[in-house]
Image (cartoon, rainbow, N blue to C red):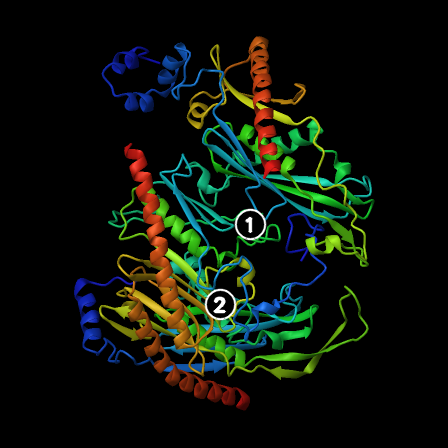
């Protein structure tokens, strides 16, 4: 742990004496356990959005889902140096960075930056938040879009499906499903699944996510409207 | 890069509409598949697979390592894909990097299961040597030699074949080490444990062109796709992973439909691969 | 410089925004001659400054500092290290300043910002030389274990005076720092004492029960000024910094002693009186910042 953790070799994060095991309440048979933050299985964390978080950007947004906090900035448009000939499509470059204190063990996110696949893994749970926030930032930058994109994930723990999992829950999950969609067009733009799923479970999880996406979409739209009416005043 | 004229594009799309693709296949038909195992002697297991003009190699290397502190009873598996510039001039330099990463992530998503290890094609707890102290780290490397579409399915099949070709040396752990000490190990040169690959899923990619979807698309067909869904399915018919490519959105009901089609196709593919793999193993033994 | 009056003539006909972009220096100098800045500040006034403690739940101490729209997020994570043999009862502080691509259009992904390592070094020098933290307080078991405090500061929005905001967030994070209670186990490793165990009888006594907070003596605060002709502009925005290049940063501690002084080049040579003016402005600013910090801390205590 010491070698993968902190920046300088030889330092370590003191851990509790008790080993973190899959807690008893995550057991398969018991359906009545509480989630660590007291939410219901199908209840998302309270979501908060605000546009215009970064002044120097063309568009930006801040999102807060419980303890997950994300800022997205949009810069540009810039002249492409790679394009040699005229092109009628633009390019969208995405870059995600993670603070060293974002994970319980310091530096777990950023040290692995060269393995972008690992970064992807580290970000797994926060990815839907990042995606939703990014679509809001693009809207704030005044870029034309088909629709806002909302992202939600579901974890499968034993027989239960829990929506919008936190890191602690994800560490014990048997499977995960993430959907990003354009709610007003009812189209799925991205879908990724890990772990073993039966068809019935899969359909249930997809429906849960889609419903949550449309709720999220309402919050995001409200945030944009608020910003727009504030700028009119 | 595939440069197609407007006429060629119409020809491909029209063929798919009429269930007769430009190479004479139906929408749900694969190109001929051939498998060779044990192609890299230094690796613990390896396989080469050809699907039409697409050719990939997968190799498995096993090394002793330390298990993750969060999961002391499990080994580790890392999957990396490299796109050789031999396959396509575009892969020269860093050109293949993006595709390589995308393929690696999709393979990890499809083969490694959930965080707790449930649904993984590779049983991670079988890789443990001494709990919390020593485990096997599997390094699975995929190499794209020739690229004519459907890379993910080919890589998935190659990894499945390479794993069934993999022998892991038997390890004796010396008793007596306590506390934080690393126990001594004795790695056998003769005895190898065969890997159980019955749980390794296959990957079926359905590529959507126009209103229809096709399996085993060539690069020319892929250039006309609106989106593609790759589903990894185990022998039992369970979904073990899924990832989507392509910019166009899909209606949720279309996705459900694609999954059930993929499940149907996977049954045939698993049987086909199994017979090819055992034939390849038999060939190798003869030589 | 060929046609010095060209812009002057045009200014009456041109739109304000166009004039600002075409002749930025003239635009600013016109304001300066009226003793006002484009954002309506007098020359010597700093922008509105806010401080929020405890912004990062996963860190042991954290703070979010805003000076105008320049935003800094600082967080401290405590890890355990084995102290060096030269100083067996001292801990260590590692400071890192980051400028992720979200903070400014100048920073591009994959190319680290040039300013970041410079500010990183200035922060470490300032904090260590100010003597704000007694490294002995970070010791746990002499010669065996001590705290390593990793302070990471992220610039979330870069709009000038980066060092000032970074330093403010850093000292605020240290004043918010709550050191976890730990004890030494049989293997010689430091382990956490969890909240539930606190009341119960422990097999091992905690080694730092009394040392949950660091005692901060003489806290450093800073002010960056632009020197341009005979004007001094306190707390510049990014636009001002890009147009007028001579910057002076003065760091004073809470008892108004000079901790550090930076003047990284620039075309205007400061005379002594200008330097004295900068120090005087900083002395004013230190009082303001001290109040803002005290307010933030007392706000925390009420919660």
Q: Is residue B234 above or below residue C257?
A: below
Residue A81 sits in which quadrant? top left
Disc marking residue B108 = 2
How busy is the neighbourhood of tag 2: few (under 14 within 10 Å), some, or many (20 plus)? some
Disc marking residue C207 = none
Labels 1 & 2 near each other (Cβ < 8 A): no
Q: Is residue B1 above or below residue A64?
A: below
Residue C164 sits in which quadrant? top right
Residue B190 relative to residue B146: left or right: right
Along the line of sight, the residue nearer the viewer: C235 or B107:
C235
Query: Which chain letter matches label 2?
Result: B
Number of marks drawn: 2
How busy is the neighbourhood of tag 1: few (under 14 within 10 Å), some, or many (20 plus)? many
The quadrant of the picture occupied by the C terminus of chain B is bottom right
Residue B203 relative to residue C78: left or right: left
Residue with the mark numbered 1: A102
Is residue A92 shown to the viewer in this render? no
The quadrant of the picture occupied by the N terminus of chain B is bottom left
| Residue C89 picture location, percent across and down | 81, 41
Residue C117 relative to residue A50: left or right: right
Tag 2, which secondary structure?
helix
Q: In this view, does A160 lie above or below A231?
A: below
Q: In this view, does C55 lie above or below C22?
A: below
| Residue B137 picture location, percent across and down | 61, 69
Residue C185 sits in which quadrant? bottom right
Residue in the picture at 73% in, 44% down: C147
Is residue A100 shown to the viewer in this render? yes
Tag 1, which secondary structure?
loop
Along the line of sight, the residue nearer the viewer: C185 or C212:
C212
């Amino acid at each position: 742990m010491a070698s993968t953790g902190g920046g300088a070799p030889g330092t370590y994060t003191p851990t509790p004496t008790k080993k973190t095991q899959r807690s008893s309440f995550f057991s398969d048979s018991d359906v009545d356990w509480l989630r660590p933050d007291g939410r219901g299985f199908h209840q998302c964390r309270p979501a908060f959005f605000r546009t215009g978080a970064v002044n120097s950007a063309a568009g930006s947004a801040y999102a807060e889902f419980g303890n997950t906090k994300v800022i997205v900035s949009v810069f540009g448009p810039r002249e492409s140096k790679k394009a040699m000939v005229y092109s009628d499509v633009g390019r969208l470059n995405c870059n995600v960075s993670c603070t060293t204190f974002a994970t319980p063990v310091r530096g777990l996110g950023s040290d692995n930056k060269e393995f972008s696949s690992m970064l992807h893994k580290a970000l797994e749970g926060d990815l839907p938040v990042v995606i939703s926030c990014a679509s809001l930032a693009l809207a704030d930058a005044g870029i034309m879009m088909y629709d806002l994109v909302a992202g939600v994930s579901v974890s499968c723990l034993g027989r239960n499906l829990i929506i919008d999992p936190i890191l602690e829950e994800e560490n014990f999950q048997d499977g995960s499903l993430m959907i990003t969609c354009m709610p007003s067009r009812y189209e799925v733009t991205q879908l990724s699944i890990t772990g073993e799923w039966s068809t019935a479970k899969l359909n249930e999880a997809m429906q849960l996510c889609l419903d949550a996406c449309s709720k999220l979409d309402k919050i995001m739209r409200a945030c944009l409207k608020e910003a727009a009416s504030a700028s009119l005043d | 890069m595939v440069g197609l004229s407007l006429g060629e594009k119409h020809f491909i799309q029209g063929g798919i509409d009429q269930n007769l693709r430009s190479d004479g296949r139906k929408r749900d038909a694969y190109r001929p598949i051939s498998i060779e195992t044990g192609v890299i002697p230094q690796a613990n297991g390896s396989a080469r697979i050809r699907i039409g003009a697409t050719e990939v190699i997968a190799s498995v290397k096993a090394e002793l390592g330390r298990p993750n502190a969060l999961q002391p009873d499990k080994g580790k598996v890392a999957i990396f894909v490299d796109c050789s510039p031999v396959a396509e001039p575009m892969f020269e330099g860093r050109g293949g990097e993006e595709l390589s990463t995308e393929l690696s992530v999709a393979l990890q998503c499809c083969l490694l299961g959930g965080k707790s290890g449930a649904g993984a094609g590779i049983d991670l707890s079988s890789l443990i040597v001494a709990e919390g102290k020593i485990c096997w780290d599997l390094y699975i490397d995929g190499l794209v030699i020739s690229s004519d579409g459907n890379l993910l399915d080919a890589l998935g099949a190659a990894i499945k074949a390479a794993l069934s070709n993999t022998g892991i040396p038997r390890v004796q752990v010396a008793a007596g080490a306590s506390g934080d000490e690393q126990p001594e190990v004795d790695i056998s040169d003769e005895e190898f444990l065969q890997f159980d690959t019955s749980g390794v899923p296959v990957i079926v990619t359905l590529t959507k062109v126009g209103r229809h979807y096709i399996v085993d698309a060539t690069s020319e067909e892929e250039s006309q796709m609106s989106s593609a869904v790759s589903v990894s399915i185990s022998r039992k018919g369970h979904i073990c992973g899924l990832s989507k490519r392509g910019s166009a959105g899909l209606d949720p009901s279309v996705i459900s439909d694609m999954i059930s089609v993929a499940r149907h196709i996977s049954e045939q593919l698993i049987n086909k691969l199994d017979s090819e793999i055992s034939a390849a193993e038999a060939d190798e033994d003869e030589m | 410089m060929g046609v010095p009056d060209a812009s002057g003539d045009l200014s009456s006909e041109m739109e304000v925004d166009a004039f600002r972009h075409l002749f930025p220096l003239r635009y600013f100098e016109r304001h300066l001659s009226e003793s006002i800045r484009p954002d309506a500040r007098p020359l010597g006034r700093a922008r509105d400054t806010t401080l929020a403690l405890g912004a990062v739940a996963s860190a042991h101490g954290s703070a979010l500092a805003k000076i105008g729209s320049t935003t800094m997020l600082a967080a401290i994570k405590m890890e355990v290290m084995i102290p060096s043999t030269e100083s067996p009862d001292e801990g260590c502080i590692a400071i890192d300043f980051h400028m992720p691509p979200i903070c400014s259009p100048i920073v591009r992904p994959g190319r680290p910002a040039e300013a970041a390592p410079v500010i990183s070094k200035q922060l470490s020098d300032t904090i260590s030389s100010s003597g704000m933290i007694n490294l002995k307080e970070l010791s746990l078991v002499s010669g065996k274990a001590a705290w390593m405090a990793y302070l990471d500061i992220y610039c979330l929005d870069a709009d000038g005076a980066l060092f000032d905001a970074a330093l403010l967030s850093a000292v605020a994070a240290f004043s918010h720092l709550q050191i976890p209670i730990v004890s030494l186990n049989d293997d010689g490793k430091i382990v956490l004492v969890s909240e539930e165990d606190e009341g119960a009888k422990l097999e091992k006594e905690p080694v730092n029960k009394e040392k949950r907070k660091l005692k901060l003596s003489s806290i450093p605060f800073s002010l960056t000024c632009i020197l341009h002709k005979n004007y001094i502009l306190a707390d510049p925005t990014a636009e001002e910094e890009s147009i007028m290049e001579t910057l002076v940063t003065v760091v004073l501690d809470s008892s108004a002693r000079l901790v550090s002084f930076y003047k990284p080049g620039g075309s205007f040579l400061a005379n002594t009186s200008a330097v004295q003016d900068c120090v005087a402005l900083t002395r004013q600013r230190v009082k303001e910042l001290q109040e803002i910090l005290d307010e933030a801390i007392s706000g925390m205590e009420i919660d």
